[in-house]
DNA sequence: CGCCTAACGTCTACAGTGTAGGCATCACCG
DNA sequence: CGGTGATGCCTACACTGTAGACGTTAGGCG
């Protein structure tokens, strides 16, 4: 009975290294990516790590805190270069990066979008606030007044998140069904009440998210630049 | 023992009428508005109605279906007039209506935003799709090509949802704390890492959501009209 | 009127959840 | 060597969604 007594039952995979916040969070992320948000229970995650579920509470106070941690982990994949002098190009690049990130981790998007609603700005995980600070830096360095930078940020990030939600809604995992109506389940809609929606089925089916995002960003950025005292042209007032 | 035997214990309020889907859903909405999404458990809702929790399953297959029902109920508060010839005015009005609706029911915004992510378009509650169809009608009747109408809708609704999320994030319930930093919890942020964010605290504190939304809509609509073959001016190509 | 049927509401039970509190074990440092 | 704090495990509790079987009621039809 003095043998190390490896538990033969639970550990789904042989991970037996010492726990750490990073390990816990990244395993949680894997789990969510693979099986969805609901699969992320303390017990399930514990089992995935080959540890007692209670161990997890050493690395996250709550389940909620754990979710926040995962959000933060994902957002850290996003690189921002606040020193880029070409702020428009930088914003466009960030937008596409965030879009791709969302497509890579679709199951986390609800977290990204929902968690901040129940946490006042200053109490959010720092990693979550870094993009905000960095984009402010980018804009202010480019010549925007601080207050205007905030407005630009809001319009920009608002549109960006909206676009991601839109695209993910229309995104359908199952690519075997190549009939547009079926893929989107539109066949169930009463033709009488939803004529235009049904008529648009083929267009709905091939959604070019990148292009749509790009156009939106274009419109927003040029519109904003015209309306605010932009960086290069400090007093170019509203044109229309 | 032949008396009607009113149960003296559970019913928090004297509601004892026969159940109905509307009654169930509206009580659920009340509950969520008052105490948040987590408070909406089957047992709690049953108790609120003075009924056994199991009764609810006659009116909603799932807890998920119940949530969908509540979403639908809220979205029905939104009035759209697809026959309005002034589509820009109509879109702007809808935007403000939806914004107010979100401020009135902040706790269901996560639902509005999250549920569609896990339900293919055609399987969503019909009430949820009506805005989409009606806005398409509005745009097409105004002269947009069907496909362009879809693009306009996407940009518009994307921005709109994004704005609402933004505003609700910065919205703070507790108005007793009048110190901006405290209200947003910004005092906790390390000054060194978040200088601009902290400097913007006062601006962050008084957020004029309506104005910000209005400007965004302006920019988007004029930008879109310039880029697409608009309604009145069928071939007005991109200006910039 | 009485009956039948389907909708409605209730009860019991079960597997699964987050997490508080206490205890054993381990690594490490003086 | 002893001790001290971090780490992991265990038990237990209140609570969740919901399957399945059971009474109870309401409404239509003879």
Image (cartoon, coloured by chain):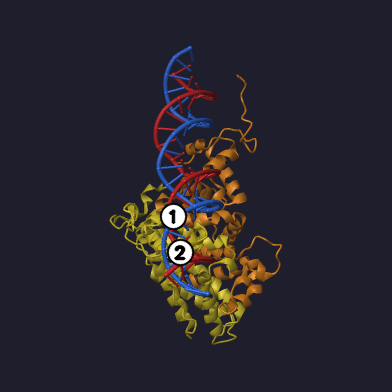
Chain colours: A orange, B yellow, C red, D blue
Residue of label 1:
B53
Q: Secondary structure at mark 1?
A: helix
Sort mark 1 into few (<14), some (14-19) or many (20+) by Cα contacts within 10 Å: some
Q: CA distance from mark 2 to mark 1?
A: 17 Å
The image quadrant that residue D24 belongs to is bottom left
Does residue A49 sit above or below D21 in this rendering?
A: above
Q: Residue B171 in the image: x percent, y percent?
A: 38, 60
Residues B57 and A98: in front is B57
Q: Chain of mark 2?
A: B
Residue at figure coordinates x 45%, y 81% from the top left: B89
Q: Are marks 2 and 1 on the same chain?
A: yes
Q: Give the vertical position of C28 relative to A32 (above or below).
A: above
Residue positioned 37% across, 51% down in the render: B185
Taking the image as shown, residue A5 lies to the left or right of residue B61, namely right
Q: Position of residue B11 (x, y in %)?
A: 34, 56
Q: State yes or no: discs 2 and 1 in contact (Cβ < 8 Å).
A: no
Asked whether, in this view, residue B42 is left or right of residue C25, the answer is left
Find disc 2 in the rendering and name its residue.
B70
Disc 2 vs disc 1: which is toward the camera?
1
Q: From where the camera sits, is residue A62 visible?
A: no
The residue that appears at 58% across and 80% down in the rendered structure is A192
Quadrant, the N terminus of chain B: bottom left
Viewer-proximal residue among B58 and A51: B58
Q: Indicate which disc, 2 or 1, sits on the residue closer to the N terminus.
A: 1
């Amino acid at each position: 009975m003095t043998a190390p007594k490896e538990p033969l039952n639970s550990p789904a995979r042989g991970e037996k290294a010492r726990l750490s916040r990073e390990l816990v969070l990244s395993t949680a992320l894997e789990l969510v990516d693979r099986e969805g948000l609901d699969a992320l229970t303390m017990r399930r995650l514990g089992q995935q790590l080959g540890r007692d579920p209670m161990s997890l509470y050493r690395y996250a106070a709550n389940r909620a805190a754990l979710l926040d941690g995962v959000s933060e982990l994902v957002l850290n994949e996003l690189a921002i270069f606040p020193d880029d002098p070409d702020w428009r190009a930088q914003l466009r690049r960030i937008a596409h990066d965030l879009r791709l990130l969302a497509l890579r981790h679709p199951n986390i998007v609800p977290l990204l979008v929902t968690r901040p609603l129940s946490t006042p700005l200053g109490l959010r995980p720092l990693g979550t606030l870094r993009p905000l600070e960095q984009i402010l830096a980018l804009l202010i360095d480019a010549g925007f007044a601080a207050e205007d930078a905030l407005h630009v940020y809001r319009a920009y990030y608002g549109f960006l998140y909206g676009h991601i939600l839109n695209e993910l809604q229309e995104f359908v995992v199952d690519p075997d069904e190549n009939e547009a109506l079926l893929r989107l389940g539109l066949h169930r809609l009463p033709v009488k009440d939803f004529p235009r929606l049904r008529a648009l089925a083929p267009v709905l089916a091939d959604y070019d998210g990148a292009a749509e995002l790009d156009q939106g960003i274009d419109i927003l950025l040029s519109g904003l630049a015209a309306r605010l005292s932009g960086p290069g042209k400090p007093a170019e007032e509203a044109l229309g």
